[in-house]
Amino acid sequence: MTASEAGGPTNTTREARNHTAGASSGRWLLLLLLTTVLTQTALNLVRPLISYRVIALGGDGLAVGLVTAAFAVLPLLAAVPLGRMADRTRRGWIILAAGVLLLTGGATSLAVTTSVLTVAASNTVLGLGHLVFMLAAQGGVAALSPAHNLDRNFGWFTAAASAGQLAGPALSGLLLGGTTDQHLTQATTEAFWVAAGAALLALLPALLSGIRHERSSRREEGARKTSTAALLRMPGVPSGLFVSLALLAGLDLITAYLPLIAESRGIAPAVVGLLLSLRAGASIASRLLLDRLLRFVGRTTLVTASCSVTAAGMLVVSLPATGVPGMAVALLVGGFFLGLGQPLTMTHVVTAVPETARSTALALRLMSNRVGQVALPFLAGVIASPLGAAGALWVGTGILATAGVVPQTRRLRAGRSRDGTPGDNSQL
């Protein structure tokens, strides 16, 4: 099915839109990147602290896994309906702002939690806010970026997310400092309020971004006609979703279980924050370099390397003999390659489907990510209970190693390369 058959714009219309989008990209893209940095700083300030909060409330490794999985439960039900709504609406900035408010509410509710159950409920709100924000932001990049700038703009967008992933854990380490177990509850409460404030600051740039999608009767009809089943049957989409799931699940497991591994080895929370920030900094560098890397290396090779090297890094971190220097090297190298996979799967998904269904396809991608965020932390928690936190990282290592094989066994079409001709860069 082509974009025109699905009710999408013609080449002439697309070129005109791309020219307009390119001319005005400075403002909307800058505001979107600022919003992303602020929201992801808040989110990644909160998420490592959730593990400490669970520990402070008497939870164990299994409880950490269940609470981490709660982040993804509600988004599983909401992803596709939200994606279809985004495909049919012009007001992307409203959805963006709604995501910001949900993230603010989730962080605020975490600050007043007094039991593991209420932590899980608050984490569910946080997960829904993250889904809504990411769907609106990624849909905006897909809709407003000229075709030849998709890789670059998705790279910049994910680099902004990584900047938040760097700043958030660093702030959490500073706020907790050398906090003892007896004072973890109070320390995490203060940090959750700081996160809520950071998320709220993102509301203004979100409202000012003015992200809009083109709207026409043909676009709305096309969005309705392209069913979920039809999207899943399109070449490359299922495997692309699996690769994205594996990469995000690996990141989640590192975020959730590194604090537990560190605690078992006598490593302070401040050091954990720095290690997570080091990983995020490496991901920022790789995403800023993505456009240049694609000039020399195809998508298939980059995605394979992203999964395989990240798996190796997780394995090194999990080994009992690995100290702080070894963890730092593993997270630095693994973080660089981890950063490459997500923007590539975004470009892959949006170029593999009709333009009228791009937000729905991105929603499917986010939903598959949430499936992984529910199932894999649960499995990791079950394994971590008898084997310790390192066992949870072994789960992530296995999934990522499997995902690394997928691009090589199936050369998947992901649209067209920047010059408009199929090639290795058009494959996952």
Image (tube, helix red, strand yellow):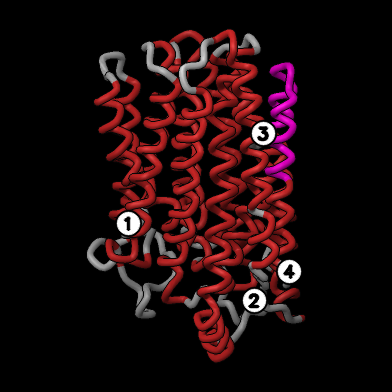
Hey, what amino acid is under mark 3? Answer: Trp
Q: Assign the C terminus to one quadrant of the image.
A: bottom left
- Residue 336 seen from this side: yes
Circle on res. 412: none
**Magenta highlight range:** 102-122
Say whether disc 2 or disc 3 marks the residue closer to the N-terminus: 2
**Disc 3 marks which residue?**
193
Residues at marks 1 and 3, CA–CA distance in whole angstroms: 42 Å
Element on which disc 3 rests:
helix
User: Label 3 near label 2: C-beta < 8 Å?
Assistant: no
Which residue is at 40% across, 60% downward? Answer: 412
Element on which disc 4 rests:
loop
**Disc 2 marks which residue?**
6
**Disc 4 marks which residue?**
91
Instruction: Judge depth for marks 4 and 2 and give the one in front.
Output: 4
**Is 175 located above or below residue 226 in the figure?**
above
- Residue 76 seen from this side: no
Q: Residues within 10 Å of mark 2 (few under 14, many from 20)?
A: many
Instruction: Judge depth for marks 1 and 2 and give the one in front.
Output: 1
User: Label 3 near label 1: C-beta < 8 Å?
Assistant: no
Hey, what amino acid is under mark 2? Answer: Ala
* The magenta stretch spans residue 204: no
Please tell me in which quadrant of the rendered image residue 129 appears: top right
Q: Residues within 10 Å of mark 1 (few under 14, many from 20)?
A: many
Instruction: Judge depth for marks 3 and 4 and give the one in front.
Output: 3
Instruction: Judge depth for marks 4 and 1 and give the one in front.
Output: 4
